Image (cartoon, rainbow, N blue to C red):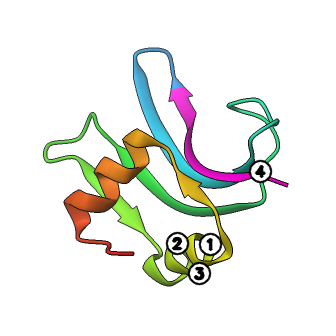
Amino acid sequence: MSVKIRLTRMGSRKQPFYRIIVADIRSPRDGRFIEKIGIYDPKSDPSIIEVNKEKALDWIKKGAKPTNTVQKLFDKIGLEK
């Protein structure tokens, strides 16, 4: 089973915020997920990025690969592999 760390869209029209989740790659974007590990709100000033670093690192050690966008968010908050 391949697992990705990716974003799922929440919120209303024109007011999006995102959950950072761990999900099977075959699941739809807003569908089933394994675990929620954080949130990202790009509309606030400054943007809010909250991640449970312990869970994120644990999933990366287990083989989960972050998407490009999530990897950029991890770099912003200083999450190292």
**Mark toward the viewer: 1 or 4:** 1
Comes first in the chain, label 4 or label 2:
4
Q: Is residue 11 above or below residue 22?
A: above
The reply to whether the C-beta atoms of the residues labelled 2 and 3 are less than 8 Å apart is yes
Residue 45 at x, y percent in the picture: 14, 43
Q: How far apart are marks 2 and 1 (CA)?
A: 5 Å
Please tell me in which quadrant of the rendered image residue 8 appears: top right
**Mark toward the viewer: 3 or 4:** 3
Residue 80 at x, y percent in the picture: 32, 75
Apparent side of residue 49 relative to residue 65 in the rendered image (left or right): left
Which SS class for mark 1? Answer: helix
Give the numbered dot on residue 58. Answer: 3
The residue labelled by disc 2 is: 56
Which SS class for mark 3? Answer: helix
The residue labelled by disc 1 is: 59
**Mark toward the viewer: 4 or 2:** 2
Give the numbered dot on residue 2. Answer: none
The reply to whether the C-beta atoms of the residues labelled 3 and 1 are less than 8 Å apart is yes
Apparent side of residue 24 relative to residue 47 in the rendered image (left or right): right
Q: Is residue 66 magenta?
A: no
The residue labelled by disc 4 is: 33
Residue type (three-letter) at the residue carrying disc 4: Phe
The reply to whether the C-beta atoms of the residues labelled 3 and 4 are less than 8 Å apart is no
Residue type (three-letter) at the residue carrying disc 3: Asp
The reply to whether the C-beta atoms of the residues labelled 2 and 1 are less than 8 Å apart is yes
Q: Is residue 11 above or below residue 53?
A: above
Residue neighbourhood size for the residue with mark 3, other residues' Cα within 10 Å, grouped as few (<14), some (14–19), many (≥20): few
Span of residues in magenta: 1-11
Residue neighbourhood size for the residue with mark 4, other residues' Cα within 10 Å, grouped as few (<14), some (14–19), many (≥20): some
Q: How far apart are marks 4 and 2 (CA)?
A: 14 Å
Q: Which of 15 and 72 is in front in this view?
A: 72
